[in-house]
Amino acid sequence: MLASSYKDEDGHISVSGSGAAAAAGGGSLRNKKPENTAFKQQRLPAWQPILTAGTVLPAFFIIGLIFIPIGIGLYVTSNNIKEIEIDYTGVDMSSPCFNCSQNFSWNSTKSCTCSIPFQLDQPYESNVFMYYGLSNFYQNHRRYVKSRDDSQLNGNEESLRSPSKECEPYARHDNKPIAPCGAIANSMFNDTLELFYNDPNGTKVQVPLTATEIAWWTDKHVKFRNPGGEGSDLAAAFQGTTKPVNWRRPVYELDSDPNNNGFINEDFIVWMRTAALPTFRKLYRIIQRRNNLLPTLPRGNYTLEVVYNYPVRSFEGRKRMILSTISWMGGKNPFLGIAYITVGSICFLLGIVLLIIHHKYGNRNNGADVSH
């Protein structure tokens, strides 16, 4: 027998016919119909903004009036931060570090020392932060970033003796496990920077540099730990391991301070936090303010003493030392202020243009609508 179906005025589907086929067909058609609810029948109330001159123009002007003052404040704050960069790569023949850059390599057994004089035109108040900067160094390379063993860095004894395969080819040397293993640790920055103030009476006064509190607290106390725990003999804890290929001394001789030695050495921790861009800076030392009546670094002549241990000629890189103060928004970064000023200015100008267009053509359109 045949079955037929039709839709009545209420939208219900009726099935006519006889036999099992008609019953089965009617059941399947009824099952496919969505339930008569507001959600499934798409009868829920909805809101849609209507963009008119009365809503769009004030929004543009408000954004402009808010963003422009914020941008000006950020830009002025950034410009008030004092900063000086000293490039000591030694590329130019006139550079004091030229001989060091030409003759030094990873295989060099003797250090090379050079001195760079510079001048501060204005005093630096409050704490001053000393950074080292590298250019054309791609710490963000995928294989480089993965070349580490976080379990070993956390003090795990098993990982200390059997480094992860991710560390290859810097996992073993002379049939001994490398501690710390991996390409990141092997390429650790190891220049020594010292700062001297040239007193007007002719004496050189060394500026005290603080080597602690330069790493993130979570890195220092959570991610990095020495094997054997606190207070253990590091030389005994690292016995049976060897130093990275490019290092001059083992990890347990990085510092004489036991709280800043081994895997918890803060210079090492700072280097292990890889940079996202090929040109970067990392915190090296802090110059603490010791007298509220005197500036931290007075105006005058200074000398940067560099023990040149880190070669950059092989990858055409550059090295620099940066002295900088900070503000509530961090270091010197004018981009954020410029971005706010640009966005605010564009919104304000668009508001003026749209206001002129609305004033010139809006009344004409309204008159045409009334005449119809």
Image (cartoon, helix red, strand yellow):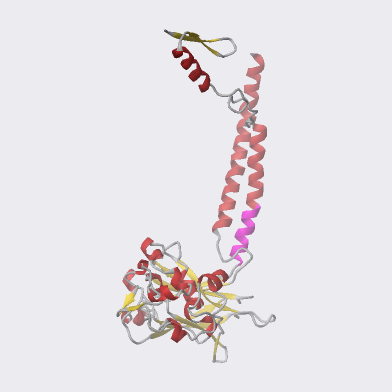
Image quadrant of residue 251? Answer: bottom left
Residue 127 at x, y percent in the picture: 61, 76
- On the picture, is 313 further left or further right than 251? left
Going 49% across and 86% down the picture, which residue do you hit?
233
Taking depth in this image into account, of 370 and 27 the one nearest to the observer is 27
Magenta range is 69-80
Principal secondary structure, stretch drawn in magenta? helix
Residue 218 at x, y percent in the picture: 56, 69
Going 69% across and 80% down the picture, which residue do you hit?
292
Image quadrant of residue 110? Answer: bottom left
Q: Is the residue 172 above or below the residue 305 in the image?
A: above
Q: Is residue 192 visible?
A: yes
Taking depth in this image into account, of 146 and 190 the one nearest to the observer is 146
Q: Is the residue 168 above or below the residue 57 in the image?
A: below
- On the picture, is 303 further left or further right than 126? left
Does the segment drawn in magenta span residue 79?
yes
Going 36% across and 73% down the picture, which residue do you hit?
312
Furthest-front residue in view? 20
Image quadrant of residue 58? Answer: top right
Question: Which quadrant holds the N terminus?
Answer: top left
Residue 183 at x, y percent in the picture: 37, 70
Does the segment drawn in magenta span residue 143?
no
Taking depth in this image into account, of 136 and 2 the one nearest to the observer is 2
Residue 275 at x, y percent in the picture: 45, 65
